[in-house]
Image (tube, grey):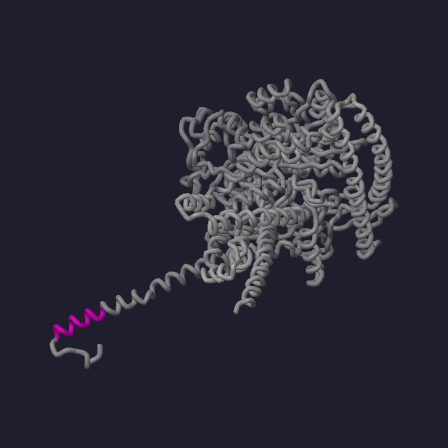
């Protein structure tokens, strides 16, 4: 996580929001020009956080290349590595980086590492009901709320809103926890970063989708839950987070994510099997170029995530030898 | 107790009264009165729950597509926004929020026990402001108006736009203000642009798709020769020449069609429309990217119904857009229907033959009862287990073998080696086969012994008896089993997620290319669509009504399929009745 944040900051990302609050993509991103001779079929298996985004990219890509067939399946990030290894999918979208064991297994079969495309930036948001007056939470508090092992260093578990500092009718109300199921990359990432690799409490209600978490929080006044910021609705609000108790809190906005201030921002990845000794076939190459293009990143905004900058796009395209 | 039955002594009378009282109590229980009430009550609760559920789904589903009015809200701080009111609720403002309020508003909330009202508006214009919905507290509203001329615009991308038409450009000319052109002319231009867009789609999806299909076929044929004869053989060289020829011809077709599409697209780009939202912010999009637009507050009932039915038509007949949250669900309807049909085709003979053997031929002993118990237990296995079995056995083992034997030229991309329509149908057939077996056995058992004996007495063999006497008589019962299996199968989602249902399937499982039915393709399913829109879509608020509409549709589809099966069954019954003595 720290790595992601510092990386984002190091890339010197500029704030890209208009006054009204709508996200705008980096004007330096290339617009997409279709090339000839692209056809075939693509299959994507992986993250459900990226499910909608993949579908939007697929729709945009199909508008450029009507004859390309794209099939999308999203049951969780953990389904991506086996699909790539078995060759059942061309793309493996994941909402967390691949684990060492997964990379090893891939390498054992192909002799090289899978390539990661950083398609979008996501601030993993902690949602509460829209009437919840909570101002700020530190990661230690989040850990004490969600975790039973409290590796973040909290001395006691936090079970009621009063223990987090709320008063009035909130003081004695128990915190109702919503989270993702364990196949999800969001689950894994939150566990790693916000729970400091601790274990979730048994009382976390595991939901089958990010949207379900938001709906759960929306219908339960005393709830708290986590999922991608893209799933925010008018019924919930995001809680500003601070990395350490006592330091400043930052809300889950694009600027804070880019600057590395928001403590749990992450990249959303698409993994591809790219043989470094061969050129990538045109369909996959063009799809990757499309993802990094202006319309591709507009789709990211449409899905509620934050677009990557021209600099990231350029670095990644160069790494895959895809710049012309 | 009446006087003539009373005995002279008082004690006796008392004991009699007690006994008679006891007797009436036992009579009451013996008549089964309480049980009748209990049974009736249980039935009533059951019916109430079903009706309540159907009503909930219908109520939420039916109104979804009805056009709503657009309110223009002026907030206390002077902010103005426009949106469709979605729902209102009561809430308790926090102390801080209360402190910031005007004294009059505070007093009003205090008289209402500290509760205030608020309303959720669908404000649209996601591309401009980054939010689709907005809550507004009632005490924060200065004014609500419903002005004429405010449009709701459904677009291909970014969801709805709420605002007014500012200007329209046609044929690449200068932009002309909307007032100058007039609504009728705008509508006409829109219709032309949409028609052209449809044409572009037909060329790109249909014609160019066909060219690509043939090109793919040729490529696979070449690869097949390569695999069979090796790359240095004479056969491969001939095949390569043939491929080059065919490729050149197809390439020509492709270029011609692509040029045609490009010309249409260039023309399409010349027609644009500029909208302005309530704050004056402008947005220009292609005229063909507008799916539908209407002046929400000016519509009469007839016009509203027009929009309503046009939305329904789009929903039923179109393909999904925007990651399945908009557009239609036609591929899902089609997928559900075809899968259920295949399921019936697979499960009926399998179940009926098994039941026939168990009931008519097998020696009724311990083994048969073990088999029967196992079949009944099969019905209790969680459906996801069937999904895992289907994936492991059908897709990976059977499908993988088929791929290696018959589709080697397509490897490493799997043909039958991953989830698909066929494997889904077979998995669900396995899941529902116990229902058919049990129903068929019951139906066979219900055929009177006298009929079989009569048949034997006429000299018919066992098979002839089964074929001409027993089976026709049992047919309605068998059909009942099939109907139950169908209803169970069509509503099942969990195992399908493993064996072939996807969020976005590029092609329908049936199309115009040989062999017309593509059993290996993955498909979309209404049940999974509900799960996807309900739990996965970015905007769950906008997704909620779609969940109800899709649920309604799934229920309707199952009801229609069941009804047709029931009609067939009743026909069979009638035919059978007619042939009685």
- Residue at image position (37%, 64%) is B36
- Residue at image position (78%, 37%) is B212
Report the quarter where the N terminus of chain B lies: bottom left
- The relative height of residue B58 versus residue B76 in the rendered view (above or below) is below
Front one among B49 and B430:
B430
Magenta span contains residue B185: no
Q: Find the residue positioned furthest to the front.
A: B459
Magenta span contains residue B12: yes
Image-based side of B578 in relation to A11, left or right = left
Front one among B557 and B350:
B350
- The relative height of residue A30 versus residue A128 in the rendered view (above or below) is above
Chief secondary structure of the magenta portion: helix
Which quadrant would residue A289 be assigned to in this image? top right
Front one among B302 and B4:
B4
The answer to whether residue A11 shows anywhere in this view is yes
**Magenta region: which residues?**
B10-21
Q: Position of residue A173 (x, y in %)?
A: 42, 41
Which quadrant would residue A151 be assigned to in this image? top left
Which quadrant would residue A257 be assigned to in this image? top right
The answer to whether residue B545 shows anywhere in this view is no
Image-based side of B277 in relation to B488, left or right = right
Image-based side of B215 in relation to A229, left or right = right
- The relative height of residue B56 versus residue B5 in the rendered view (above or below) is above
Q: Position of residue B363 (x, y in %)?
A: 43, 48
Q: Position of residue B138 (x, y in %)?
A: 57, 52
């Amino acid at each position: 996580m720290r790595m992601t944040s510092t990386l984002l900051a190091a890339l010197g990302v500029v704030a890209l929001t208009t006054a009204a609050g709508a996200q705008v993509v980096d004007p330096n991103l290339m617009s997409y020009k279709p090339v000839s001779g692209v056809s075939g079929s693509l299959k994507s298996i992986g993250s459900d956080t990226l499910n909608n985004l993949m579908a939007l990219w697929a729709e945009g890509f199909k508008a450029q290349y009507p004859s390309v067939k794209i099939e999308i399946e999203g049951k969780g990030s953990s389904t991506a590595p086996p699909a790539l290894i078995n060759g059942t999918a061309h793309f493996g979208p994941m909402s967390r980086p691949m684990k060492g064991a997964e990379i090893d297994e891939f390498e054992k079969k192909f002799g090289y590492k899978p390539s990661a495309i950083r398609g979008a930036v996501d601030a993993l948001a902690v949602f509460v009901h829209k009437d919840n007056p909570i101002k700020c939470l530190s990661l230690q508090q989040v850990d004490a709320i969600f975790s039973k092992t409290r590796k973040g260093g909290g001395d006691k578990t936090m079970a009621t809103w009063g223990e987090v500092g709320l008063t009035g009718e909130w003081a004695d109300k128990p915190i109702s926890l919503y989270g993702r199921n364990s196949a999800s990359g969001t689950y894994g990432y939150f566990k790693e970063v916000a729970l400091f690799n601790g274990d979730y409490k048994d009382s976390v209600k595991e939901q089958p989708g990010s949207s379900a978490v938001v709906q759960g929080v929306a219908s339960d006044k005393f709830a708290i839950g986590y999922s991608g910021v893209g799933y925010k609705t008018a019924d919930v609000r995001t809680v500003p987070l601070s990395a350490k108790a006592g330091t400043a809190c930052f809300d889950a906005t694009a600027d804070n994510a880019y600057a590395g201030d928001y403590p749990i921002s992450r990249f959303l990845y698409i993994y591809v099997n790219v043989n470094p000794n061969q050129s990538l076939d045109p369909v996959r190459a063009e799809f990757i170029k499309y993802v990094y293009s202006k319309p591709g990143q507009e789709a990211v905004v449409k899905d509620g995530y934050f677009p990557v900058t021209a600099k990231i796009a350029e670095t990644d395209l160069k790494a895959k030898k895809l710049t012309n | 107790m009446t006087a003539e039955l009373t005995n002279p002594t008082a004690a006796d009378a008392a004991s009699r009264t007690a006994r008679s009282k006891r007797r009436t109590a036992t009579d009451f229980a013996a008549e089964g009165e309480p049980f009748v009430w209990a049974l009736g009550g249980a039935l009533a609760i059951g019916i109430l729950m079903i009706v309540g559920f159907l009503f909930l789904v219908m109520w939420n589903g039916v109104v979804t597509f009805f056009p709503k009015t657009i309110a223009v809200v002026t907030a206390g701080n002077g902010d103005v926004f426009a949106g469709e009111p979605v729902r209102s609720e009561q809430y308790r403002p926090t102390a801080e929020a209360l402190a910031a309020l005007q004294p009059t508003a505070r007093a009003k909330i205090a008289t209402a026990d500290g509760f205030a009202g608020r309303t959720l508006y669908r404000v649209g214009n996601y591309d401009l402001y980054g939010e689709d919905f907005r809550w507004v507290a009632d005490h924060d509203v200065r004014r609500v108006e419903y002005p004429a001329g405010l449009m709701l615009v459904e677009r291909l991308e970014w969801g709805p736009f709420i605002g007014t038409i500012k200007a329209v450009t046609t044929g690449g000319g200068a932009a002309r203000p909307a007032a100058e052109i007039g609504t009728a002319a705008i509508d006409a231009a829109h219709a032309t642009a949409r028609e052209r867009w449809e044409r572009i789609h037909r060329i790109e999806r249909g014609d160019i798709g066909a060219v690509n299909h043939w090109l793919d076929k040729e490529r696979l044929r070449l690869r097949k020769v390569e695999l069979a004869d090796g790359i240095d053989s004479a056969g491969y060289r001939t095949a390569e020449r043939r491929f080059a020829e065919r490729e050149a011809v197809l390439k020509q077709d492709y270029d011609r069609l692509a040029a045609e599409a490009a010309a249409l697209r260039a023309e399409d780009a010349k027609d644009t429309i500029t909208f302005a939202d309530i704050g004056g912010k402008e947005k220009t999009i292609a005229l063909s990217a507008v799916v539908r637009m209407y002046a929400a507050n000016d519509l009469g009932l007839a016009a509203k119904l027009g929009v309503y039915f046009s939305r329904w038509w789009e929903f039923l007949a179109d393909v999904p857009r925007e990651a399945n949250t908009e557009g239609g669900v036609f591929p899902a309807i089609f997928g559900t229907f075809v899968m259920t049909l295949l399921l019936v085709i697979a499960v009926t003979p399998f179940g009926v033959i098994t039941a026939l053997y168990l009931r008519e031929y097998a020696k009724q002993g311990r083994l048969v009862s073990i088999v029967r118990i196992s079949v009944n237990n099969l019905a209790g296995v969680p459906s996801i287990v069937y999904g895992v079995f289907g994936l492991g056995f059908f897709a990976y083992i059977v499908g993988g073998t088929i791929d290696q034997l018959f589709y080697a030229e397509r490897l490493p991309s799997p043909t039958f080696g991953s989830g698909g329509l066929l494997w889904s149908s077979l998995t669900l057939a396995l899941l529902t086969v116990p229902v058919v077996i049990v129903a068929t056995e019951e139906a066979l058992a219900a055929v009177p012994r006298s009929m079989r004996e009569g048949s034997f007495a006429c000299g018919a063999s066992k098979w002839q008896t089964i074929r001409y006497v027993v089976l026709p008589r049992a047919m309605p019962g068998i059909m009942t089993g099939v109907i139950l299996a169908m209803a169970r199968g069509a509503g099942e989602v969990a195992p399908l997620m493993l064996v072939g249902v996807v969020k976005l399937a590029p092609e329908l499982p049936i199309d115009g290319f040989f062999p017309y039915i593509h059993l290996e393709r993955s498909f979309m399913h209404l049940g999974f669509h509900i799960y996807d829109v309900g739990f996965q879509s970015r905007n769950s608020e906008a997704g909620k009504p779609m969940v109800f509409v899709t649920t309604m549709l799934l229920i309707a589809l199952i009801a229609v399929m069941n009804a047709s099966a029931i009609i067939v069954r009743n026909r069979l019954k009638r035919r059978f009745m007619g042939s009685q003595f």
